[in-house]
Amino acid sequence: MTGVRQGTAQQAVGGWVRSHPQAAAQGPQLPGRTDLDAATAATAAVLADPAASLMDRYHAAEAEAATYRAAADAVVVQAEAETEAELEL
């Protein structure tokens, strides 16, 4: 691996995280309303396409469902954080 003299790649990555602490605190962006609308529109477009295969339709529906699940999970995480903050008071 270029750029790493000795040690493992994990140590190199860990060193980068230690030198950039804000990177360790950031996670993936959670879907918002526009993401949900875009997922629904993408699925509708695939379903309306007469050339789309059954698997195309399935994958589009699964991607939309995953977006909605992520949004629902975000609501749960936010509620848990608010509850935890209230308990600290």
Image: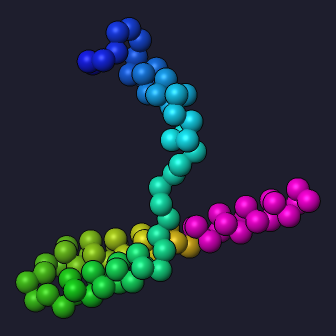
Say which quarter of the image contains residue 75.
Answer: bottom right
Does 53 sit left or right of 86 as displayed? left
Q: Position of residue 70 (x, y in %)?
A: 50, 67
Q: Is residue 14 visible?
A: no
Q: Is residue 9 visible?
A: yes
Q: Residue at x 55, y 28 (%)?
A: 18
Does 74 sit left or right of 70 as displayed? right
Q: Is most of the magenta stretch helix, strand or loop?
A: helix
Farthest residue in the top direction? 6
Does 23 sit left or right of 47 as displayed? right
Q: Where is residue 71 in the image (x, y as percent from the top left)?
A: 52, 72
Question: Which of the image's four quarters has the N terminus?
Answer: top left
Q: Give, as a single range, the part of the protein colored magenta.
A: 73-89
Q: How many labels does the image show?
A: 0
Farthest residue in the right direction? 89
Q: Where is residue 26 in the image (x, y as percent from the top left)?
A: 53, 49
Q: Which residue is drawn at 86% across and 64% down?
A: 86
Q: Does 75 lie within the magenta span?
A: yes
Q: Which colour scheme is used?
A: rainbow
Say which quarter of the image contains residue 65.
Answer: bottom left
**Camera-side residue: 8 or 69?**
8
Q: Residue at x 8, y 84 (%)?
A: 51
Question: Which of the image's four quarters has the C terminus?
Answer: bottom right
Q: Position of residue 54 (x, y in %)?
A: 18, 79
**Camera-side residue: 22 or 61?**
22
Q: Does 68 lie within the magenta span?
A: no
